[in-house]
Image (cartoon, rainbow, N blue to C red):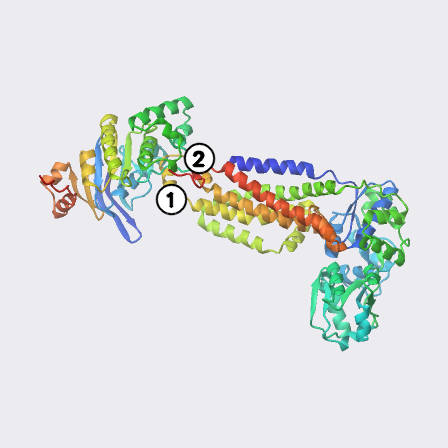
Amino acid sequence: MFALHRVQVRYPGVLALDDVSLDFARGQVCALIGSSGSGKSTVLRLLIGLVRPTAGEVRVDGMPLATTSLQDIRRRLGYVIQEGGLFPHLSGRDNLALLPRHLGWTRERIAARCNELAERVRLPVSALQRYPAELSGGQRQRVALMRALMTDPPALLLDEPLGALDPIVRHELQTQLRDLFDTLDKTVILVTHDVAEAAWLASRLVLMRDGRVVQDGGIADLQRTPTNDYVRRFLDSARRLPERPA
Amino acid sequence: MRRVLGIAMLLAVMLAAGAHAAPPPVRIGSKAFTESVVLGEVARLSLREHGIAAVHRRSLGGTRILWRALREGDIDAYPEYTGTLVQELLPGTPADADLAMLRARLRPLGIGVTDSLGFEDSYAVGMRATRADALKIATISDLRAHPDLRFGFSNEFMDRDDGWRGLRRAYALPQRDVRGMDHDLAYRALAQGAIDLTDVYTTDAEIPYHHLRVLRDDRHYFPPYRAVFLYRLDLAQRVPDAIEALRALAGRIDVQAMQRMNAAVKLDGRSETDVAAAFLGVSAASPVQGMAARILQRTREHLALVGISLGLALLLAVPLGILAARWRRLGHVVMALTGVLQTVPSLAMFVFMIPLFGIGAGPAIAALFLYSLLPIVRNTHAGLTGIDPALLESAAVMGLPARVRLLRIELPLAMRSILAGVKIAAVINVGTATLGALIGAGGYGQPILTGIRLDDLGLILQGAVPAAALALLVQGVFEGLERYLMPRGLRPGVNA
């Protein structure tokens, strides 16, 4: 569905992506992992048109991104960032209704979709009356996820969606996200720096470092046949709990 | 946002509708001092006695403003002095020009002049009689022996070629402590001993009242200032009888009569209308307005000035602020321009507007409009550029068109800042609008100006107190509006 072909992105003084080629198949859940500055968020920002490649090409459904209307592409994508990106002046419900209203949905259709999604992400419908500042971190991310799903786009781009949550909420949302991905059948590209989270949610992991792809495959491939020492070290950095004394 | 604009426009339209009716045919102007206002009333009442509808736009300002208003056709006639014509308005006219010569020189300008009304009101300088006696000063030449004397002259006298500059040259006066002030304040300063000498008009009621000595002009520096009416010659086509009525006033007012009328207004506190009516032996017939009605009318005028200028400024400044936030380079230009406007002194700004908008509420609204731009543009710009970039990105990646993003997301997020800017502009306007009275715009400035002219503290307070109250009220209204318009999620204290 998305393809990067020999893409380079240069910010003033920094090479954010260096000759990266990636293919994201329809229906696949893929996680981009790596430490900060590795270029994983830049891949997402390329796909949604917030960043333009300085060299190479980005294709969406086989069409070069430059030739398609950005607005059309964006409406076919749901995008969630770390802090949710909810608009503080709108209630949860108004945040959800923003795009559908513009697309001419009826009030009833919007309400029905809100209820359906609230059930999916296990958010009490009453919470939608509240403003973002009145919601907990987990609730905020649930609303943000609902907003991304409102118009049922074929693809979801998630940039560290659980990065700012406390461990228990994070664990709970990881479980729900996996259920969601299993049932929705969407192309999902997820950025995270947490290997365990990536392995739990995604069938394909792309490990990046300094703007290049280091290894691309399932978690088992990365564990069994790491292409180099960095992959091994990155995987080992996921700390396990110490053994409980008997 | 739409709500704000809606309210502003509604306010502007309502106030505009209430503010002004169609102007009656003959418009008399007067300068901002008692004698001129009295003569303006004399003219208005005698026109009325001739069955001619007339209005009097009183206390419009200084010579320049009246002269320009007459030439531009904003007024049809006003009282003037021959000396001013010679010295100030008709450059190159010989100092001993008679009325026939003045008339000939005015004709090409489309201006006519009546014969002398019967008295002279010449410039002179005066000091307290006791002080003059103590220093043995009787003539202007005697001043040379006392270089330490403090002079306080009316601003007009300071600025005019035939005022202080010429006087100093003619008499080689050595004094260094010379300042400009309002003519009426100068009398008070003189009475309190804050200054030693000021310029006076020979018909001023204060001369006997404050026991002043008018110094003899031993070098005949001051030209004669015979009182006349100037009028537009085209009045002959529009209202032919009006010119006849003005001419009929010639020779009817002698210097004692004028001094008595000035005293009746300035010292006895009678209205110019009453005094002029008593002189003409007609009824004043102006319905005496109670204080409440007067204040109400001034409030309406004041609100119109502030409301219309602010409403128009909103319509321009918010879009300008949006453009400035979108294009940085344009933003710099817009900010610089509106910033420069703000540095123009308010009195000068009001006067600059006269050639463009005439006199009255128009130029005052234009000036206030220009002053309102900076706070609104700046705060709109600051509000928009201060939005968290992550929110702007979130809005962009939703695939909403720019217009929808602006209306639904960016402007609401910038609302607090924009409203603060509008509030600042409104409060400043309430204060600055008092200066509008100088160019005939009415409002609370009218009693303040008249109060200063008549040295009447009560009258000053009639303007100053409501102006201050209105400023507080405007502040309060905007704070309420802020609460009403501010989305709940942005109000302080909303938190999980």
Q: Is residue B5 left or right of residue B19?
A: left
Q: Chain of mark 1?
A: B
Query: At x 57% / y 36%, what residue is drawn?
Result: B7
- Judged from the image, the secondary structure of the residue bearing numbered disc 2 is helix
Please name the amino acid that badge 2 sits on. Val
Query: At x 12% / y 40%, what residue is drawn?
Result: A244
Considering every residue shown, the one lying at the far front of the view is: A246
Q: Quadrant of residue A194?
A: top left
Q: Earlier in the sequence, mark 1 or mark 2?
A: 1
Q: Is residue B42 left or right of residue A140?
A: right
- Judged from the image, the secondary structure of the residue bearing numbered disc 1 is helix
Residue B67 location, x and y as percent?
Answer: 75, 54
Can you tell which mark lies on residue B404?
Answer: 2
Q: Is residue B363 visible?
A: no
Distance between mark 1 and mark 2 Cα atoms: 17 Å
Q: Is residue A42 left or right of residue B200?
A: left
Q: Quick one: label 2, few (<14), some, or many (20+) residues within 10 Å?
A: some
Residue B5 location, x and y as percent?
Answer: 55, 37
Residue B82 location, x and y as percent?
Answer: 82, 59
B283 over B33 or under it: above or below: above
Residue A162 location, x and y as percent?
Answer: 27, 38
The residue indicated by pointer 1 is: B389
Q: Chain of mark 2?
A: B
